Image (cartoon, helix red, strand yellow):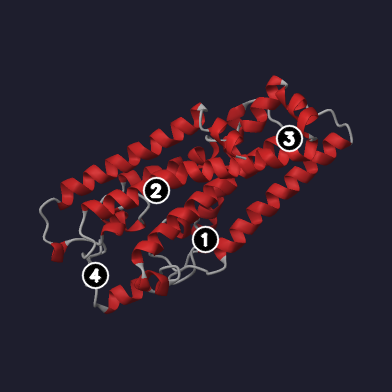
Amino acid sequence: MIKPIKAHFEQKGVLATLISLLILLMANYIRNITIYSGTDVSMMVYPMKLILMSVNNVNSHADEFMLLVYLFPVLAVLPAGFSFLEEHMTGEEAYLKLRMGHRRYIMGKLRDAFFTTTIVFLIPLLLDIFVTALTFPMSALGDQINFGIYSKEYELHLNNYFIKDFFLNSPLLYTISYAVLTSVFAGLLGMLTVSISYCRPPKFRVILFLPVFLLLNLTMYIDSYMQQPGSISYFWGDYLFVFGEYRKSKVYIPAVFLSLIAATALLTFIGSRRRKNGCGIQ
């Protein structure tokens, strides 16, 4: 398993994703240094609320965070989403299936896409947490929504955190768990993209960006349509970026993750059946 994943890390898509994430992280970090340099600890924001994937950042500077939201559908596909299609177009697919066996080949492609994409996201996100924790005082307790930490408004705000008690007991581990969740989500999207290209290989690579883009934007439109004061959020970013301020469903993340896995399995099954029945997929 290590060798195929290592091979993916030599691809341009992996490098492009890493560089994009690191540029966003660096821009956000420099902005935080500029804003909070010389600030007394009693006036400082809790450092984990300053990281790139913190929704709390929107209350002071939203540029880098919003860029991450907009680029996420592209960055989730770039590392390994094209891996099957490239081999299909070059004819390498036929050789590898002959050598490895059909089932082992496609299962390996899905597995490698998942782990490659997950790792590509996880490394920069954990680096951001580590560097921010070293740079800013972890004893700071402030928040960028300008509520006092002992105020009723802040208590109501905390109630909208996903698993609030986890945050209160260990804010750092809470933030790390979000980095893992976001990375795994990206990995599942990369794996889904491979299964789509396996089920029905498109003629142009750019088409493979569309399913993830449409899927993520669909949650935004559903949220806009369903949103009422105090209602549950349906927007994917409110669940997979940390410190979101909107009310959440505890079953949303498991349901979305299981749905992505089920969709991947179904598309892979359909693709395998079509090949077995000799549909002449080109």
Real-space CA distance between mark 4 and mark 2, rounded to the nearest whole angstrom: 27 Å
Residue 200 tag number: 3
What residue would you read off at disc 4? 147
Q: Residue 125 carries which label?
A: 2
Mark 4 or 2 closer to N-term?
2
Q: Distance between the residues labelled 4 and 3?
A: 51 Å
Contact flag, marks 1 and 2 (Cβ < 8 Å): no
Element class at badge 1: loop
Q: Quadrant of residue 3?
A: top right
Residue 244 as seen in the image, left or right of residue 46: right
Q: How crowded is mark 4: few (under 14 residues within 10 Å), some or many (20 or more)?
A: some
Q: What residue type is labelled 4?
A: Phe
Viewed as shown, does residue 28 lie left or right of 92?
left
Picture disc at residue 126: none
| Earlier sequence position, callout 4 versus callout 3 | 4
Relative side of 195 to 69, left or right: right
Tags 1 and 3 touching, CB below 8 Å: no
Q: In the rendering, at what x and y percent does residue 192 appear?
A: 64, 44
First in sequence, mark 4 or 1: give its number: 4
Q: Write the residue at 45% across / 31% down.
A: 15
Residue designated by label 1? 234
The residue that appears at 17% across and 50% down in the rendered structure is: 35
Alpha carbons under labels 1 and 3: distance apart: 29 Å
Which residue is pictured at 14% across the width and 62% down the height? 41
